[in-house]
Amino acid sequence: MLVLAFEAFSFFEEVSIVDFFTDSQWTPLFSDKHFGIAPLLVGTLLTSGIALVVALPFGLLIAIYLTEFASPRLRSILKPMLEILAGIPTVVFGYFALVFVTPILQMLIPSLEPFNALSPGLVMGLMILPMVASLSEDALYTVPRSLRDAAYALGATRLQMVFSVLVPAAMGGVTASFILAMSRAIGETMIVAIAAGQQPVLTGNPLSPVETMTAFIVQVSLGDTPHGTLEYKTIFAVAAALFLMTLFLNNISLRIRERFERAYV
């Protein structure tokens, strides 16, 4: 932590923090140097946004199914499968996105480039799916049985009870799971480093290659950049920005979780 703060401060002694957040180009390794983090930030949010579109609804639906609809036997099968999925190394997900998902998507979308934001985003969504499902399931289990019984007493069907009573009552824990999943997606490294490309272009097109904050850190950390140079210090500036983003999201998730737990104590 101290090393990160010291190196980031050293970087901002040479580069204006205003340019860091307002410049639209990121070319610290080129002769014409620009230090605008916007392309990396947009690439990170683009891939993470695609992942969340996949993981959040399907993770919540899986949690609802496991909680209210699955038989004990089926649940005993599905839960370990989710845990196995969560234990797969991210480098495997990265090559899965590159050599399997991208060719399939190219057959459906001919304009899709070999390196793009869409493929790693989808696979990243698959990776964080168990986190959303598990945490959402825990939140749904904490809802008092009396609320379910009251809904049934008023004539609600099981689906009506789930979406009108159960999910709203557990929304604090579900929201916390969503924010933690977002934090995990933003901090993902290997999937985007392998399949998203390393082109820091300011674009919102998921069919084009992008570079994320974590992928840039990997690129510079490979050893080709001399230690102690301004180019080398960029990894600490990017890492500090990434740290603050994930810290902010984790604190929000913790506060929501605590408020949710106090509501039912």
Image (tube, rainbow, N blue to C red):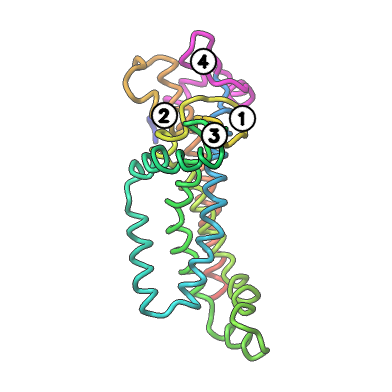
The amino acid marked with disc number 2 is: Ile
The amino acid marked with disc number 1 is: Thr
Residue 186 in sight? no
Question: Which secondary structure lies at badge 3?
Answer: loop
Q: Which label sits on residue 203?
A: 1
Specify which label sits upstream in the sequence, 1 or 3. 3
**Crowd tier of the residue under label 3, counting other residues whose Cα lies within 10 Å: few below 14, some 14–19, many 20 or above:** many
**Crowd tier of the residue under label 1, counting other residues whose Cα lies within 10 Å: few below 14, some 14–19, many 20 or above:** some
Q: Which label sits on residue 217?
A: 2
Marks 3 and 4: in contact by CB < 8 Å? Answer: no
Q: Which label sits on residue 121?
A: none
Marks 2 and 1: in contact by CB < 8 Å? Answer: no
Residue receiving disc 3: 112
The correct choice, above or below, for 130 with respect to 39 in the image is: below
Specify which label sits upstream in the sequence, 1 or 4. 4
The amino acid marked with disc number 3 is: Leu
Question: Which secondary structure lies at badge 4?
Answer: helix
Residue 16, how many percent across, how many down? 58, 19
Marks 3 and 1: in contact by CB < 8 Å? Answer: no
Specify which label sits upstream in the sequence, 2 or 4. 4
Question: Which secondary structure lies at badge 1?
Answer: loop
Mark 1 vs mark 3, foreground winner is 3
Q: Could you give the CA–CA distance between mark 1 and mark 4, rounded to whole angstroms?
A: 27 Å
Residue receiving disc 4: 14
Q: Residue furthest top?
A: 31
Q: Residue at x 57, y 32 (%)?
A: 111
Residue 55 in sight? yes
Quadrant of res 91: top left
The amino acid marked with disc number 4 is: Glu
The correct choice, above or below, for 71 with respect to 192 in the image is: below
